[in-house]
Image (cartoon, rainbow, N blue to C red):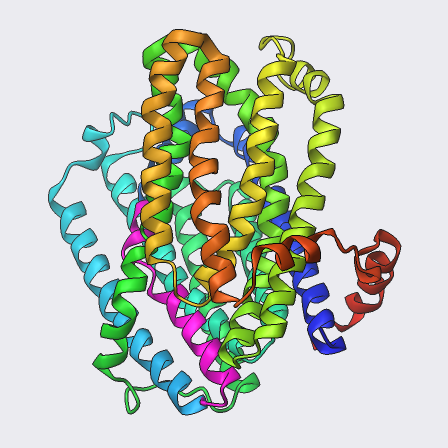
């Protein structure tokens, strides 16, 4: 890797860390603020209404993501005309989908008594409908933001695009919190949040046009053939949220059916603690993903192999490091986090931590497949693996209790590793012995002291 690639990776990690920090701030701040200014029942009903528009995010399937991958690979091949064609084609597809969804949502809200169906008593029927509409509009505008960030990604400025998105998210959240603090009710709060998101999307459109002059808004270069070519990988992306739902919610349902609600609490809290490591692995994955698209698009296979090896190496280092900390302090943290209401089980937590290590290898390897739009079989295997784990979770929980339920999650991780690692090696034109040898090599650039020094040098240049 040359210095420019290393610099982008460092800045990408910083921007992803900022994004995670922004999400953490939002999660930690909103609950006490809302509960301080609103009554508990009002906030509870707000959460119910807020959960409904989230399902609209699946409406564009995965076109924004696959378009970003395709644009990045095209620009790496110096095909800016093709990238512009993909951008305009997906822009108008998303615009048509969003307009249709908003129209259907408006008609549904007009005729359906949402407040009565949701059993709301503190938020009126009219306010409930407007809240869903405003929040739904915000969700749909987010589909454009994903495509706009892809424009920065395809020219190698994805850290800046991610940083700007984090700033806009925090700004919209800050506007919403200010509205609550100044005495606004749920309906006005939703309107302020929607207005802030609309403003952020408009500003992002202007920034993209200013920073990337060859990106044009319009339909002159749009082509239905581009949409048709991206349709299969876009639909395949739907397998990942389905698999995530099976893994997260399906396992909890299986434990609940087999062992009851008390066991669900013990199982769920232990798994939540272990998933801290998964978040750090996800940061590594999102950092390397754009560079893999660039290298593969330019047919620079030596760089593709290097990126894959270093990404897997760093993900495993992060996962093992956090796992060791969790093994030492996890039960203590779990006991204090739950106020002693959930008995900590070191053996149960250790099984979940083993799941994390297996997840780190296949999920990071799979980034090469998703970043190059070669993930159709990957999505199928993921749904099959998580589905098998759910079924086994029920039967093993009945036979072996919570330990059996946790062990069932290892099944999907093993299935994914057996498919993903060989498949990613084929894409990178690598061999398993060479891959393992590369993983065992610990380069100077990955030493903590060197990484910290590079991060300190890169922070002032984040926007460039």
Drawn side of residue 327 relative to residue 105, left or right = right
Residue 51 in sight here:
no
Q: Position of residue 435 (x, y in %)?
A: 62, 57
Drawn side of residue 130 relative to residue 23, left or right = left
Asked if 138 appears above or below 1 in the picture, the reply is above
Q: Which residues are magenta?
A: 54-79
Q: Is residue 69 magenta?
A: yes
**What residue do we see at 35% from left, 27% from top?**
390
142 or 365: nearer the viewer: 365
Q: Quadrant of residue 5?
A: bottom right
Q: Quadrant of residue 389?
A: top left
Query: So how many labels did they put on this image?
Result: 0
Q: Quadrant of residue 356?
A: top right
**What residue do we see at 76% from left, 56% from top?**
441
Q: Position of residue 76 (x, y in %)?
A: 52, 83
Q: Quadrant of the C terminus?
A: bottom right
Q: Is residue 411 magenta?
A: no
Asked if 247 appears above or below 71 in the picture, the reply is above
Residue 310 in sight here:
yes
**What residue do we see at 28% from left, 27% from top?**
120
């Amino acid at each position: 890797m040359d210095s420019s690639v290393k610099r982008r990776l460092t800045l990408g990690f910083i921007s992803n860390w900022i994004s995670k920090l922004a999400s953490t701030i939002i999660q930690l701040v909103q609950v006490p603020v809302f509960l301080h200014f609103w009554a508990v029942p009002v906030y509870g009903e707000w959460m119910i209404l807020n959960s409904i528009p989230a399902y609209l995010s699946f409406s564009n399937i995965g076109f924004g993501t696959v378009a970003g991958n395709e644009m990045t690979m095209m620009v790496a091949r110096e095909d800016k005309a093709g990238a512009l064609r993909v951008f305009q084609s997906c822009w108008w597809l998303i615009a048509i989908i969003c307009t249709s969804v908003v129209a259907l949502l408006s008609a549904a809200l007009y005729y359906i008594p949402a407040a009565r169906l949701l059993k709301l008593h503190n938020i009126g029927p009219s306010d409930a409908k407007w809240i869903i509409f405003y929040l739904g509009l915000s969700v749909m505008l987010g589909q454009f933001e994903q495509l706009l960030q892809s424009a920065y990604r395809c020219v190698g400025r994805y850290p800046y695009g991610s940083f700007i998105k984090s700033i806009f998210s925090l700004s919209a959240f800050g506007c919403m919190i200010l509205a609550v603090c100044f005495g606004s009710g749920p309906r006005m709060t939703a309107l302020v949040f929607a207005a802030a998101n609309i403003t952020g999307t408009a500003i992002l459109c202007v920034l993209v046009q200013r920073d990337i002059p060859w990106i044009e808004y319009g339909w002159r270069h749009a082509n239905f053939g581009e949409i048709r070519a991206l349709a299969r990988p876009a639909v395949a992306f739907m397998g990942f949220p389905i698999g995530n739902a099976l893994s997260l919610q399906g396992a909890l349902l299986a434990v609940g059916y087999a062992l009851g609600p008390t066991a669900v609490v013990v199982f769920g809290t232990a798994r939540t603690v272990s998933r801290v490591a998964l978040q750090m692995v996800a940061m590594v994955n999102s950092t390397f993903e754009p560079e893999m698209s660039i290298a593969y698009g330019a047919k620079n296979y030596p760089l593709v192999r290097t990126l894959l090896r270093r990404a897997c190496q760093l993900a495993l280092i992060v996962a093992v490091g956090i796992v060791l900390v969790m093994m030492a302090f996890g039960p203590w943290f779990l006991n204090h986090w739950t106020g002693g209401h959930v008995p900590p089980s070191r053996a149960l937590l250790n099984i979940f931590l083993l799941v994390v290590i297996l997840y780190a290898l296949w999920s990071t390897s799979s980034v090469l497949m998703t970043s190059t739009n070669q993930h159709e079989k990957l999505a199928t295997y993921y749904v099959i693996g998580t589905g098998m784990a759910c079924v086994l979770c029920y039967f093993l929980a009945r036979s072996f209790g919570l330990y059996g339920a946790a062990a069932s999650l290892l099944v999907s991780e093993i299935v994914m590793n057996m498919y993903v690692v060989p498949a990613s090696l084929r894409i990178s034109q690598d061999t398993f012995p060479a891959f393992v040898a590369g993983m065992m090599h610990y380069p100077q650039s990955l030493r903590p002291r060197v990484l910290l020094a590079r991060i300190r040098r890169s922070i002032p240049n984040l926007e460039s």
